[in-house]
């Protein structure tokens, strides 16, 4: 990933795709705005008028989940206008002819019909992108659909066809969280200690954790420890998750405040804050690393996380793997390469940039790619192989199909639940964190849902009315904000409201996985294995809204 402070200095044209830096990654917004103030045109691709989109020179406000179609349409237009980088394609890519054939059907007219973006806008952005020293900066937004992997692949192919890869200020950046993605931090030695006689456990996809808990057998899952997460608040199909928790013999939560998980736990163990324990932290979409050092002793009966897990391991009979004199900093040392001086990353010296062998300032500048062909695969050989074993969903070239739960993807369901729900990150919280801070509630107000004036009028809903957002999985009760920030047929309910508020968006969502599914070979997966990851398609969701009360 080419970091924002580098590419914004050298780019001539930028596309911010599915990324709302005004709420998620605000530390990057400064660099984006500085580039814009220097005159760099900014295009934003987002179905919602975010604060960043409101500053865009061009806003491509597409229908939810149509990102693969938009990228394929732009690619086809660049090819048809002979704006492609033939030298780059011949030297660094594999499968161009197959991609060209797949993209042919995506004329400007068809792309406009599917995405809702005017054809002339699509053409203009594609041409500006191809003709300039351009960067695409991607977030998670377009990934949160069952076709999200196709969006990522289509955008990657768009960049490659235009030759916008591996150049300073001209690249395609995807969402990464630093050291864990580069190989610099490596937990293999901790997960599989040399000579260990600890049996490997099963793995469960986070995308359908609740169903997996209920379905697990041989043996069934009897106990769960919730740690450093929000198993109830942040997972889809909250009611299904709660049923799975009810079936457990024991549910334990390590927490600092009374979250949804803590409310449902049989036992709540007091967890330390970040101020009371050692930690190692790669930076968000950056190439820096810092060591978190304790500044106060653990308070009251709380203990550092690593101490809890070590003590649990010792009591389960694995004392030799968890020596009592091993500190949190000692454990951290096992994550990093032996020749790395960890003191560099500790305050006041740290944070420190990770070595260039793991994090080159300009990724892929050497033209080396970790693919079977050694090139950028516009036609994926890995997908081709998986398709032979598990036919049905493995297209070697990127394709568009509607999200599973969307108006075009499920017309029958849409007759009952005609509104497409999207769920964004709120600007005043990090997921559910800070939800209990009183002054943040004063600023943000009660939970709200954004809806288009046309949809509100059809339902007799006015600004400030109390409404019920619902489908067959659950409901959320909140206040209506009626504005033009969403398209007709699209509603927006921020993520992260605690379940006990009655406004949690995940109550409405299905526990399905994004991307094609196959069988995890040689790995003990309790549920399906996804080659493309275990993304939860939070934005694959249809709902209806009705008024239940007057203005708040």
Image (cartoon, rainbow, N blue to C red):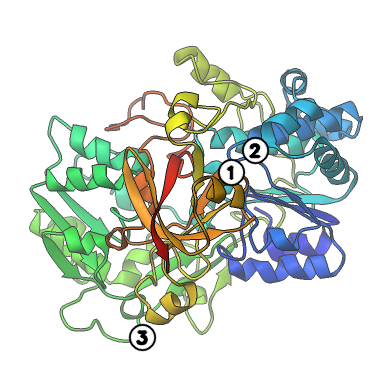
Label 1 and label 3: CA atoms lie apart by 40 Å
Q: Residue at x 58, y 20 (%)?
A: 395
Q: Residue at x 38, y 80 (%)?
A: 438
Question: Looking at the image, how many numbered discs can be counted on the residues?
Answer: 3
Q: Where residue 419 sits: x, y (%)?
A: 50, 41
> Of circles 3 and 2, which is in front?
2
| Numbered disc 3: secondary structure | loop
Q: Mark 1 or mark 3, which has the lower sequence index?
A: 1
Q: Which residue is mark 1?
A: 142
Label 1 and label 2: CA atoms lie apart by 6 Å
Q: Which residue is mark 3?
A: 295
Label 3 and label 2: CA atoms lie apart by 46 Å
Answer above or below: position of 357 versus 417.
Answer: below
Q: Which residue is mark 2?
A: 67
Q: Is residue 358 left or right of residue 328?
A: right
Q: Where residue 184 sits: x, y (%)?
A: 51, 56
Residue 481's disc number: none
Q: Residue at x 30, y 58 (%)?
A: 499
Question: Do callouts 1 and 2 mark residues in contact (Cβ within 8 Å)?
Answer: yes
Q: Where residue 265 sits: x, y (%)?
A: 15, 59
Q: Mark 3 or mark 2, which has the lower sequence index?
A: 2
Q: Is residue 81 left or right of residue 312?
A: right
Residue 494 in view, yes or no:
yes
Q: Residue at x 50, y 12 (%)?
A: 388
User: Could you classify mark 2 by the number of other residues whose Cα lies within 10 Å: few (under 14), some (14-19), or many (20 or more)?
Assistant: many
Answer above or below: position of 438 versus 124.
Answer: below
């Amino acid at each position: 990933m080419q970091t924002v402070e580098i590419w914004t200095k050298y780019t001539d044209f930028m596309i911010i795709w599915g990324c709302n830096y005004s709420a998620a990654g605000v530390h990057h917004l400064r660099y984006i705005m500085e580039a814009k103030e220097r005159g760099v045109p900014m295009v934003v691709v987002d179905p919602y008028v975010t604060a960043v989109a409101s500053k865009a020179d061009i806003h491509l406000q597409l229908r939810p989940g149509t990102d693969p179609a938009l990228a394929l349409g732009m690619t086809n237009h660049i090819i048809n206008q002979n704006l492609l980088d033939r030298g780059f394609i011949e030297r660094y890519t594999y499968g161009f002819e197959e991609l060209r054939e797949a993209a042919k059907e995506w004329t400007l007219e068809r792309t406009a019909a599917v995405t809702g973006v005017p054809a002339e806008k699509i053409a203009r952005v594609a041409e500006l992108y191809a003709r300039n020293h351009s960067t695409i900066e991607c977030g998670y937004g377009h990934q949160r659909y069952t076709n999200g992997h196709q969006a990522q692949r289509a955008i990657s192919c768009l960049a490659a066809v235009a030759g916008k890869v591996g150049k300073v200020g001209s690249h395609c950046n995807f969402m990464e969280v630093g050291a864990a993605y580069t190989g610099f931090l490596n937990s293999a030695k901790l997960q599989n200690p040399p000579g260990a006689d600890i049996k490997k456990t099963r793995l469960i996809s986070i995308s359908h954790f609740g169903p997996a808990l209920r379905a697990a057998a041989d043996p069934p899952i009897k106990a769960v420890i919730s740690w450093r997460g929000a198993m109830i608040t942040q997972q889809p199909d909250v009611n299904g998750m709660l049923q799975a928790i009810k079936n457990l013999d024991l549910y334990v939560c390590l927490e600092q405040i009374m979250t949804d998980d803590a409310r449902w736990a049989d036992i709540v163990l007091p967890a330390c804050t970040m101020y009371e324990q050692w930690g190692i932290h790669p930076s968000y979409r950056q190439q820096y690393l810092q060591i978190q050092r304790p500044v106060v002793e653990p308070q009251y009966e709380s203990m550092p996380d690593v101490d809890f897990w070590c003590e649990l391991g010792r009591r389960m009979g694995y004392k030799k793997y968890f020596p009592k004199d091993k500190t949190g900093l000692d454990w951290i040392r096992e994550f990093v390469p032996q020749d790395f001086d960890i003191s560099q990353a500790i305050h006041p010296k740290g944070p420190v940039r990770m070595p260039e062998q793991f994090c080159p300032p300009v990724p892929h500048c050497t033209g080396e790619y970790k693919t079977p062909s050694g090139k950028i695969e516009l036609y994926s050989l890995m997908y081709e192989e998986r398709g032979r074993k598990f036919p049905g969903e493995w297209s070697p070239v990127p394709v568009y199909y509607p999200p599973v739960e969307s108006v075009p993807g499920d017309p029958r369901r849409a007759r009952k639940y005609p509104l497409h729900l999207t769920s964004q990150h709120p600007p005043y919280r990090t997921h559910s964190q800070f939800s209990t801070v009183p002054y943040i509630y004063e600023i943000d107000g009660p939970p709200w849902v954004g809806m288009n004036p046309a949809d509100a009028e059809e339902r007799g809903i006015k600004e400030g009315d109390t409404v019920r957002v619902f489908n067959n999985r659950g409901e959320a009760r909140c206040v209506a904000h009626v504005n033009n920030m969403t398209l007709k047929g699209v509603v927006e309910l921020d993520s992260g409201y605690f379940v006990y508020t009655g406004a949690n968006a995940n109550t409405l969502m299905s526990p399905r996985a994004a991307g094609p599914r196959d069988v995890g070979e040689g790995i003990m997966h309790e549920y399906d294995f996804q080659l493309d990851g275990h993304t939860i398609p939070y934005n694959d969701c249809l709902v209806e809204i009705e008024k239940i009360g007057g203005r708040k």
